[in-house]
Image (cartoon, rainbow, N blue to C red):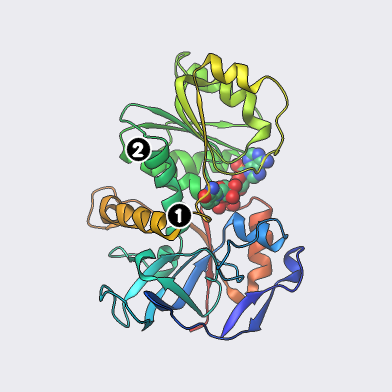
Amino acid sequence: MLAVHFDKPGGPENLYIKEVPKPSPGEGEVLLKVAASALNRGDLLQRQGKYPPPPGASSILGLEASGHVSELGPGCQGHWKIGDPVMALLPGGGQAQYVTVPEGLLMNIPKGLTLHQAAAIPEVWLTAFQLLHLLGDVQAGDTVLIHAGASAVGTAAIQLTRMAGAIPLVTAGSKHKLQMAEKLGAAAGFNYKEQDFSEATLKFTKGAGVNLILDCIGGSYWEKNVNCLALDGRWILYGLMGEEDVSGPLFSKLLSKRGSLITSLLRNRDKKYKQMLVKTFTEQILPHFSKERPQPLLPVVDRVYPVSEIQAAHEYMEANRNVGKIVVDLPQ
Ligand SMILES: NC(=O)c1ccc[n+]([C@@H]2O[C@H](COP(=O)([O-])OP(=O)(O)OC[C@H]3O[C@@H](n4cnc5c(N)ncnc54)[C@H](OP(=O)(O)O)[C@@H]3O)[C@@H](O)[C@H]2O)c1
């Protein structure tokens, strides 16, 4: 089969399409014939040699995929049959014509969505759901500050925050991105390049601060985050696109707010946790993507690249140009 490959860590120019052996499904696994995958920041980091796949995971890039069930491994419980259209959360391997998936990490594709839209759901929607509900315990009426509001995770988090009856505020680096975030439901957006988001957030909340911060930036934002965190607020760190280091009185400032700092990584969670997450998301959230709902959830797809243009797809993400997901189409 064909798969995205690189021989040594480095820039997008190292990526190429290579013929590799087709995998076989093991115990309790399904073989998925991939129609589409989507790009994640984790792919960029892995390509740079900074984010190796967890033990046992495929070294092929791709943390999610959509397609059709092609083969059932031994011991499958009968939940899926050959030909079913599905989408999957993966620890790697999605940017190939076939990938094996534990059957508990597959999801039905919501009615009315295309395979390209489905490929844009697993990694970022499960992440946003996990951050808001399982870790952040979001409550109706909470105010939630979502950094990189037009990122793929951000576009999902805005919609899920609204669905929870909470109020999403966002930061982003351009007027266009802020407008897109507001269209998806953000109550207000702040351009971090032009204004102090912390002061703007305090102004919006009349000095109270936000109950929850979803932060994929890290070091460069720490002081502003703590400044606009409400008393007893939760700050969830799930990415480090800003600086990795922190200098200054983080602990004393956080303590004065009785704030909680929680960190999260989905990829290296064990299979049992991921299966619980997929099951909970399938029951509670997936039906809300149906076009039959009055205000259906929307997987935001910025662009679709054929896998032969994988270098250009990486360059586009690296240049921070996307709003929502970059989907990669696989040859059938
Ligand atoms: N922990 C987990 O389990 C998990 C799972 C999935 C994703 N993630 C993380 O979530 C983050 C978002 O992923 P994604 O796929 O949604 O990203 P994405 O769609 O590529 O969007 C990222 C956006 O972040 C903004 N940004 C980049 N560098 C920045 C900086 N130094 N300061 C402020 N803003 C910056 C840019 O938008 P602007 O133009 O607005 O600056 C960029 O377009 C990544 O860090 C990723 O690693 C973590």
Closer mark to the observer between disc 1 and disc 2:
2
Q: Quadrant of the N terminus?
A: bottom right
Q: Residue at x 68, y 55 (%)?
A: 318
Give the SS element for disc 1: loop
Locate residue 55: give its quadrant.
Answer: bottom right
What amino acid is at disc 1? Val
Residue underneath mark 1: 300
Sequence-first disc among 1 and 2: 2
Residue 119 position in % (x across, y down): 45, 65
Give the SS element for disc 2: helix
Judge whether residue 225 can be spotted in this image.
yes
Residue 225 position in % (x across, y down): 57, 26
Against 180, residue 17 (above or below) is: below
Q: Residue at x 50, y 52 (%)?
A: 266
Against 45, residue 115 (above or below) is: below
What amino acid is at disc 2? Arg
Q: CA distance from mark 1 to mark 2?
A: 16 Å
Task: Please indicate whether residue 311 sits to the left or right of residue 185 in the image.
Answer: right
Locate residue 166: give its quadrant.
Answer: top left
Residue 165 position in % (x across, y down): 30, 34
Residue underneath mark 2: 162
Q: Residue at x 42, y 63 (%)?
A: 117
Task: Please indicate whether residue 125 sits to the left or right of residue 331 in the image.
Answer: left
Does the residue tagged 2 have its C-beta within 8 Å of any atom of ligand 1? no
Between 249 and 55, the one lying in front of the other is 55
Task: Please indicate whether residue 19 sits to the left or right of residue 73 in the image.
Answer: right
Mark seen at residue 200: none
